[in-house]
Image (cartoon, rainbow, N blue to C red):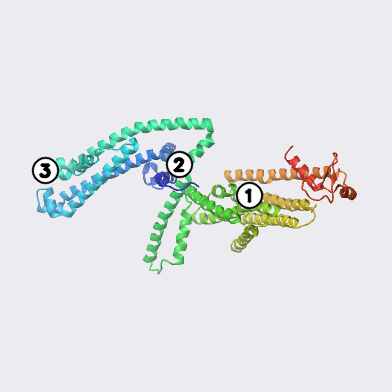
Amino acid sequence: MSPWSSDVLVDVVMRVPTLYMMDSILNKSFLSEISIFHYSATMSWMQFFRWLFLMSTLFMVAFGLFLLSNKQLMDIYSYLLSMIVMLVSYFCNLNFMKAIYTEEINKFYPENRDLWILIKEDPMNVTKILFIHLTTSFLFTKIWKFRNFNSRRTRVDGEYAMQIWIFFSFIFPLLLRAVYQDLDWFMWSPVIALTMPFVILTGDTFKSFSMHYQELSVNIQTARMTIQTLGIQSFLENQWIRLHVPKVLRMFWCSRFVFHFIYYFYAISTEYIAANIDTTYYDYQLWRMIVKILMIRSCDTTVSLLGLTSIVSCVAHYFGILMAFCVGSESEEDRNMGTVSAVLFFILALQTGLTGLEPEKRLVRLSKNFCLLFTAISHFIHSMVHPLLMSISAQRNTNLTKHIRILAMCAFLITFPICLLVYLWSEYSASTWLLAVSAFSIEVIMKVTVSLTVYVLFMLDAYRVTFWEKLDDYVYYVQSTGNTIEFLFGIFLFCNGAWIMIFESGGFIRAVMMCIHAYFNIWVQAKEGWKVFMNRRTAVKKINSLPEATEETLRELNDVCAICYQDLNTARVTPCHHYFHGVCLRKWLYFLTSSKF
């Protein structure tokens, strides 16, 4: 994962609002209050197509904003901030007009009050208005200066003069009331006060539009060249990195989580106080309810589900780094736990329809998906530990610390699934989900047991004085047994998934995942297992056809096997009259057959 920097943080923060826009459009959260955006099942076909066109257009606009460059987003936000500053000035002037036309005061002053009377009667209000105008003019000038520097990369002269002119433009209603008493002109003064800022903003808009249009044309040409030369995959990877998609999703989810936490904490605390329920900040029921609501709201929309997936990826990534550090692994493949966990979590969410469930069912399904994810992570850790376990045993590594670290991880991989199964079977009744979790957990226990058995066999061979000819057969028997059990579990999980799809909850995604599981975990494994069995059988037949050397011949030869460099206690004689261990020849022949030489 790339580190955070100030530039990356600014880029991520600027892209988060576009995700909120897409999330609101997809879920019709605030747009449903507007009549033209309100969806109804009773609307006509024409109304439906109009609604679909408007929502699609808004979504494409939000998605287009998300794809903009850092510089273009800065320009857009500067325009929005400038408009907000102008609106603040406008409403401030309206407030001033309201003070001038107060009906109660006009009872005592038949003529409308001028500025000097208002200063005498309410000096704090006038001072507040002047301060607001001074602040807004300063902000408008700074934004204008930043926008020009961002587009031209040159310093802008006349900043203070511009700020003075903007300030006088904003306080135009006050100046007009001080020197001119015509009420008709005064009624239009708030609008006239915005003329100069509006002209400046419009001029900058037209200037930047042509510049950004040229930049967009160059970006499109660059994208076409990248796709033609490097391919669509490289182009998408570059865009994924440029847009900081995982970081933006995490920032979106965290900000949404914090907002929901503050909102529901205040709402639930207020309900407790209104109901005269004694509670403290350490009350278990209060925090239990808040956590429950937060978990339900954490994945109630598609965009929030993507954000939660990114959070899961980040946590799993650093957990994988911790596990790799604990076992002493330095392989880059062992640090891909975050990507694997994110893909699996998102597929489980889509497969179970997580976002469309009722709140209570969503919470239960989310906890079940996490249990499946934990078992999958256990399998990933085993794939990290197994090569290291075989390596230290085959190489006769005498580093005791390394053995202890890897064996401790194996103990964890056995203990954790057992504890998980004991808890789940004591809390839940038998179901297809529980059977799936149990199968995954028992499978990882079986895999670890097979790895430990092979490790023990290799360690026994390391401390033997004589050559252990049957070692290869024992290892093959243990691994074949483990692979056979794993294959049977694959068939069981396929049948379990077929039952779920037919009788519980079907769907296109579940059907696709079952096809993938049937191909890779059943068909491919059966094909490879049968291929290994036939290759080994062929190798055994060919080696057994070679004549076996007598003890007298071996004593006279007094040599070692040229493959393993061990003493020749037993040997097979090749047609070229060379002497080798039968096991070594079998391994060598099996390797040639497997490599298709």
Q: Position of residue 457 (x, y in %)?
A: 74, 56
Q: Quadrant of the C terminus?
A: top right
Residue nearest the viewer, comparing 590 with 468: 468
Mark 2 and mark 1 lie on one chain; the one further toward the N terminus is 2
Q: Which residue is mark 2?
A: 243
- Residue name at image x 66 percent, y 52 percent: 386
For label 3, count other residues whose C-alpha is less than 10 Å away and answer few (under 14), some (14-19) or many (20+): few
Q: What element does badge 3 sit on? A: helix
Q: Which residue is mark 1?
A: 497
- Residue 179, numbered circle: 3
- Residue name at image x 11 percent, y 49 percent: 116
Q: Position of residue 378 (x, y in %)?
A: 61, 54
**Residue 44 visible in rendering:** no
Q: What element does badge 2 sit on? A: helix
Alpha carbons under labels 3 and 2: distance apart: 54 Å
For label 2, count other residues whose C-alpha is less than 10 Å away and answer few (under 14), some (14-19) or many (20+): some
Amino acid type at circle 2 is Leu
Is 33 placed left or right of 165 in the picture?
Answer: right
Alpha carbons under labels 2 and 1: distance apart: 37 Å
Amino acid type at circle 3 is Val
Q: What element does badge 1 sit on? A: helix
